[in-house]
Image: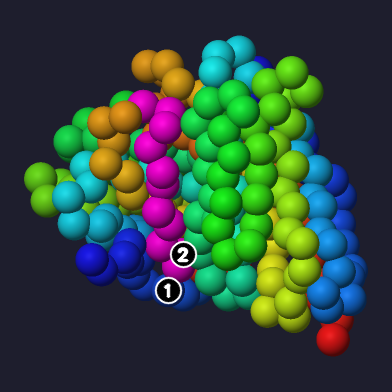
Amino acid sequence: GDSVTQMEGPVTLSEEAFLTINCTYTATGYPSLFWYVQYPGEGLQLLLKATKADDKGSNKGFEATYRKETTSFHLEKGSVQVSDSAVYFCALSDPGSSNTGKLIFGQGTTLQVKP
Amino acid sequence: KAGVTQTPRYLIKTRGQQVTLSCSPISGHRSVSWYQQTPGQGLQFLFEYFSETQRNKGNFPGRFSGRQFSNSRSEMNVSTLELGDSALYLCASSPGTSGGTDTQYFGPGTRLTVL
């Protein structure tokens, strides 16, 4: 079945460091890919999305490119801030009548940014 | 637009009881999906409702059920609560008409503790 695998955390970085969180997926169709972020005590917020191969999603300095050849959607940011400390989830939505409304999530990666 | 709202935010129940959680989607959204988040299993899809009909269902026992009303508000019910049902329950809304490319917007969640 469909699945998402993220790099294990926690990831600890100093402020202004470069961030990469790896995400790879397995899907039978042509999924849409998402990154969500969860701050302590809150629900999930959409960070960015891409719906087809080679699409690049971007938001708030974060970027991810849909790579079909490597089945990956790695999250990057050039310079992290303390306020970026949160849990990041990679997710896919596989089109098809049997998959409506269903997101499949990776296990989440905790990012800690130190001043 | 107002975001997705969930009530109550916190619940404490004892084993064997039942519980009902409520979710109000973003205005105009017709799809509501429910997820369970636990430290051990991560984020797991429960079910999705669209126009008062369940369109998709995850792999949870029949104790977990839901419904959707004509105004798109949704409720989920868990009967005969078990300790393992302690979790953060998240609902998400989307327009529901674009298949896998739809973005799901999440509420803050209901934290259920079963004693």
The span shown in magenta is B99-109
In the rendered view, tell whether residue A101 sits above or below residue B16: above
Res. B26 in view: yes
Q: Quadrant of the N terminus of chain A?
A: top right
Q: For this view, does A98 lie left or right of residue B5?
A: right
Q: For this view, does B39 lie left or right of residue A32?
A: right
Q: Nearer the viewer, residue B16 or B67?
A: B67
In the rendered view, tell whether residue A18 sits above or below residue A15: above
Q: How far across and down, in percent of the image, does residue A43 sit?
A: 51, 64
Residue B64, magenta (yes or no): no
Q: Which mark is residue B9?
A: 1
Q: Nearer the viewer, residue B63 or B69?
A: B69
Q: Residue at x 73, y 31 (%)?
A: A72
Alpha-carbon distance for marks 1 and 2? Answer: 6 Å
Which chain does tag 2 point to? B
Q: Amino acid at mark 2?
A: Gly
Q: Which residue carries the number 2 mark? A: B109
> Helix or strand or loop: what does disc 2 sit on?
loop
Q: Nearer the viewer, residue B84 or A98?
A: A98
Mark 1 / mark 2, whichever is N-terminal: 1
Q: Residues within 10 Å of mark 2 (few under 14, many from 20)?
A: many
